[in-house]
Image (cartoon, rainbow, N blue to C red):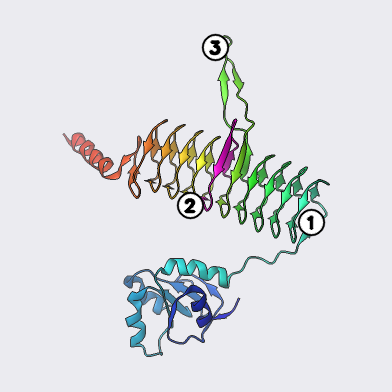
């Protein structure tokens, strides 16, 4: 979508240095930019490359204002703002709108007679919508997706191909679920019979609730509660290949990177960040704002606390302590 730089700046609450009439219609990296693209930089070191690129304009911080003023309107226009990366992300919403999908249900899709579809819902090829399921306005259900009985999906959601949502799950508004994800399956719960030594399934009759503005990556799995509810809080971002066990409580704006595994009944409070391949034992708790580095491990029933405190290693401990222990181990190895 083509827009003038001035109109983009107004939407982003940025200031234009240079020609605000320049039109842009896309975003790109500095190396791949064309004459209609916006790029961004976060530091002075990257600024010369951006100014020398083919890009139409550069989103930058206050550090770039002086450089733009030197050109006296002859150089590349700048958009000056407080948070360049955030502004760049928001510019994508302005310049790269979502694909134009035509409302309606494809002839090969199957929707139960009791299912309720909102206004302008799109149901793609071979999707299945179960009994008494509800799909909110402007939501897209991709090809081959299976929406179970009594599932509730809010408005403006995107359910990508081959997603499976088990019966009774509830999704809020503007939820994005990428291809192959499975939501609301039975948790991994068994009871061993001491007499026979055989395992018997513990009841998995709870449900799954996902808040507004959550994004779930491809092939991730989130189990429903055993007897209660598994909850994913508003704004949580879950990467590909993540597993979240039954009864977990994930807070608002939590970020979980790929290949992370959470056992059952874990509490992750708001604004926690988990790196890739993290493993957390059952009934552990990570308090608000904790940062856990890649491949970190938390033992069952443990608590990590400290807003903004980074932990690393297995068992996880504050990163400074972890690095000291690594250094001590290296010294021992040299003896």
Counting from the top left corner in percent of width and height, residue 158 is at 64, 56
Quadrant of the image containing the N terminus? bottom right
Q: Give the mark nearest the N terminus, 3 or 2.
A: 3
Residue 108's spot in the image, x, y percent? Answer: 81, 52
**Residue 116 versus residue 237: which sits nearer the camera?**
116
Q: Is residue 262 magenta?
A: no
Which of the two residues, 151 or 332, is positioned nearer the viewer here? 151
State which quarter of the image contains the C terminus: top left
Under circle 2, the secondary element is loop
Q: Relative to residue 316, is residue 93 drawn left or right?
A: right
Query: What is the quadrant of residue 280 in the picture?
Result: top left
Label 3 – label 2 distance at C-alpha: 43 Å
The picture quadrant where one finds residue 71 is bottom left
Dot 3: element: loop
Mark with earlier residue (1, 2): 1
Classify mark 2: residues with Cα within 10 Å, few (<14), some (14-19) or many (20+).
many
Q: CA distance from mark 1 to mark 2?
A: 33 Å
Task: Give the labeled residue for mark 3.
Answer: 194
Is 223 on the left or on the right of 282, as rendered?
Answer: right
Magenta-drawn segment? 219-237
- Residue 69 x %, y %: 35, 86
Instruction: Tell me if I can see residue 202 in this picture.
Output: yes
- Residue ID for mark 1: 105
Label 3, label 1: how far apart the Cα atoms are: 52 Å
Q: Which residue is mark 2?
A: 253
Residue 125 horizontal side relative to residue 273, left or right:
right
Mark 3 or mark 1, earlier in chain = 1
């Amino acid at each position: 979508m083509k827009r003038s730089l001035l109109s983009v700046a107004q939407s982003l609450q940025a200031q234009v240095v240079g020609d605000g009439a320049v039109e842009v219609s896309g975003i790109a990296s500095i190396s791949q930019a064309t004459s209609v693209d916006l790029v961004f930089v976060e530091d002075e070191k990257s600024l010369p490359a951006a100014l020398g690129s083919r890009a139409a304009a550069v989103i930058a911080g206050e550090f770039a204002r002086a450089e733009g003023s030197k050109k006296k309107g002859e150089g590349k226009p700048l958009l000056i703002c407080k948070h360049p990366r955030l502004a760049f992300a928001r510019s994508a919403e302005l310049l790269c709108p979502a694909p134009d999908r035509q409302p309606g249900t494809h002839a090969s899709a199957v929707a139960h007679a009791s299912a309720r579809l909102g206004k302008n819902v799109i149901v793609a090829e071979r999707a299945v919508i179960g009994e008494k399921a509800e799909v909110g306005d402007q939501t897209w259900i991709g090809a081959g997706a299976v929406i179970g009985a009594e599932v509730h999906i809010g408005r403006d959601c995107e359910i990508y191909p081959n997603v499976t949502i088990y019966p009774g799950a509830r999704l809020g508004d503007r939820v994005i679920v990428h291809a192959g994800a499975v939501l609301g399956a039975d948790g991994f719960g068994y009871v061993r019979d001491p007499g026979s030594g055989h395992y018997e399934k513990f009841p998995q009759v709870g449900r799954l609730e996902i808040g507004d503005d959550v994004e779930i990556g491809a092939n991730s799995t989130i189990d429903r509660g055993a007897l209660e509810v598994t909850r994913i809080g508003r704004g949580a971002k879950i990467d590909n290949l993540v597993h979240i066990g039954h009864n977990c409580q994930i807070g608002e704006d939590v970020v979980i990177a790929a290949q992370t595994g959470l056992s059952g009944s874990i509490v992750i409070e708001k604004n926690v960040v988990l790196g890739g391949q993290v493993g957390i034992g059952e009934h552990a708790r990570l308090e608000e704002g904790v940062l856990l580095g890649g491949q970190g491990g938390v033992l069952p029933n443990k608590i990590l606390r400290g807003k903004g405190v980074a932990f690393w290693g297995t068992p996880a401990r504050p990163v400074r302590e972890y690095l000291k222990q690594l250094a001590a181990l290296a010294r021992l190895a040299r003896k």
